[in-house]
Amino acid sequence: MRRRDQQVREGDFDMPRSHAAEHLAELIEAFRNEGEDQGLRAWLLELIGEARSPEALPILVEHLGHENESFSCGAVRGSNSST
């Protein structure tokens, strides 16, 4: 997911989507620890939402009103599917 080529990066994102629930704690930790790459953080937040788990709700709710639209939209989509 850290590759420079945008298409390759997006391809890397599709595989973890189906396994998000299995790795929710790791995804949350990676999201919290990733400081610089806002695109990667947005994808991680989207994966957290894909987990469709009540355990994901706190981090999703935390980002509902985020100034970065990618974060707030991902949080909205994820919180709607986690309930």
Image (spheres, rainbow, N blue to C red):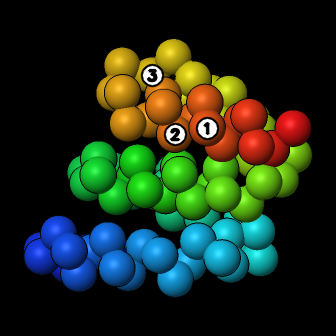
| Other-residue count near label 1 (Cα within 10 Å), few / some / many at <14 / 14–19 / ≥20 | some
* Left or right of residue 4: residue 19: right
**75 and 36: which one is in front?**
75
- Residue found at x 17% / y 69%: 6
In the rendered image, the quadrant that contains the N terminus is: bottom left
Give the residue pinned by disc 3. 66
Give the CA distance from mark 1 to mark 2.
Answer: 5 Å
Q: Is residue 25 visible?
A: no
Q: Which x, y percent locates residue 22? A: 77, 76
Query: How many numbered marks have been drawn onto this rendered protein structure?
Result: 3
Question: Which structural element holds mark 3?
Answer: loop
Q: Quadrant of residue 11?
A: bottom left
Depth check, mark 2 against mark 3: the one in front is: 2
Question: Mark 2 — residue?
Answer: 74
Q: Nearer the viewer, residue 80 or 59?
A: 80
Q: Residue at x 12, y 74 (%)?
A: 4
Q: Is residue 3 above or below residue 67?
A: below
Compare marks 2 and 3 and give the one earlier in the sequence. 3
Which of the image's four quarters has the C terminus?
top right
Residue 57 in sight from this viewpoint: yes
Image coordinates of residue 36 in percent, x first then y, are 25, 51
Q: Residue at x 55, y 28 (%)?
A: 63
Residue 70 location in percent, x, y?
38, 36
**Residue occupying the point 80% across, 44% down:** 82
| Residue contact at pointers 1 and 2, CB within 8 angstroms | yes
Classify residue 3 by image quadrant.
Answer: bottom left
Neighbourhood count class around disc 2 (C-alpha, 10 Å): few under 14, some 14–19, many 20 upward: many
- Which amino acid type corresponds to the residue marked 1 in the rendered image? Arg
Q: Is residue 80 left or right of residue 11?
A: right
Q: Amino acid at mark 2?
A: Gly
Q: Which residue is mark 1?
A: 77
Mark 3 Cα shell of 10 Å, populated few (<14), some (14-19), many (≥20)? few
